[in-house]
Amino acid sequence: MCSDRPALLVVADSLSYYGPEGGLPADHPRIWPNLVGARLGWDIELFARIGWTTRDGYWALIGDPRIWAAVPRAGAVVFAVGGMDTLPSPLPTALREQIRYVRPPALRRYVRGGYQWLQPRLSPLRRPVALPPRLSVEYLEKSRAALAHLRPELPFVATLPAVHDCAAYARVHAGREPAVRALTRWADERAVPTVDLGNAVRENVFSDRANPDGIHWGWDAHVAVADAMCAVLAPTREVG
């Protein structure tokens, strides 16, 4: 059902809809996009999948007609992707993404098990990362420019990567700081406001209140991210 209220269009990864016990539906009231929507009095249009990088966010933007339908009534757009970009990916990202297509199922389970065994053992190599900072910036700029072409006045908000304490990546996150530097330079050049997810969630991630997987957050982290988002988005409330 169409609403007369503006919408916050969020393109994100699973950090936007996972809680301390796993994934949740897009309308769950305690995930940060819906906390922001409730505070601003806006609807939420959440487009997200586990493992999405900034490249996947751009592909969704140009390829998903549901996003096209949301853009005309958006009050702002948040690109909350980029954390996955910074994780060590010593095995090709394409390999991980293709495992689901391996047949028969017994072989698929074998390949997935091998990947999961190797990933933490190779992560201390620290490189390559899933998406280099140069490409993260490139896809963010292409996304910003595409939206600006359609609606030059539409506020665009980016995020700096979160932190993690994940054994599956050997707790290695050497890719974060180079990404933060590159994203911050781009954001300054383009006057794009950013929300630093790492600052918002660090205390929760390294506590016993986070998701045990070491990647996803507990509820207080969702509140902290919502606080940071609202501080950036509050001036846009009259847009749309």
Image (cartoon, rainbow, N blue to C red):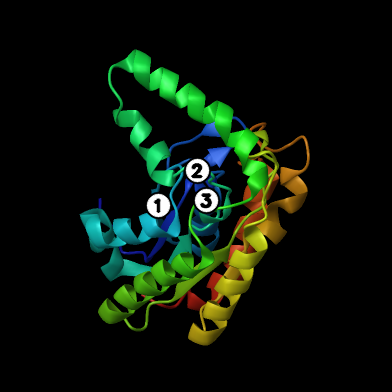
Give residue 46's mark: 1
- Please say if the residues under marks 3 and 2 sit with CB atoms less than 8 Å apart: no
Give residue 17's mark: 2
- Please say if the residues under marks 2 and 1 sit with CB atoms less than 8 Å apart: yes
On the image, the x and y values in percent for residue 225 come to 62, 57
Front residue of 42 and 69: 69
Residue at 30 percent of width and 74 percent of height:
146
When the figure is inspected, residue 237 is found, relative to residue 67, above or below; the finding is: below
- Please say if the residues under marks 1 and 3 sit with CB atoms less than 8 Å apart: no
Residue located beneath label 3 in the image: 84
When the figure is inspected, residue 57 is found, relative to residue 238, above or below; the finding is: above
Res 60 → quadrant: bottom left
On the image, the x and y values in percent for residue 200 come to 69, 58
Res 144 → quadrant: bottom left
Q: Earlier in the sequence, mark 3 or mark 2?
A: 2
Front residue of 68 and 95: 95
Front residue of 74 and 188: 188
- Helix, strand or loop status at disc 2: loop
Residue at 54 percent of width and 29 percent of height:
116
Residue at 51 percent of width and 78 percent of height:
192
* Residue type (three-letter) at the residue carrying disc 1: Leu
Q: Earlier in the sequence, mark 1 or mark 3?
A: 1
Q: Earlier in the sequence, mark 2 or mark 1?
A: 2
When the figure is inspected, residue 144 is found, relative to residue 50, above or below; the finding is: below
Furthest residue toward top: 106
3D distance between C-alphas at marks 2 and 1? 9 Å
Number of marks present in the image shown = 3
Q: How crowded is the residue under tag 1: few (<14 C-alpha within 10 Å), some, or many (20+)?
A: many
Is 163 situated left or right of 134 in this image?
right
* Residue type (three-letter) at the residue carrying disc 3: Met
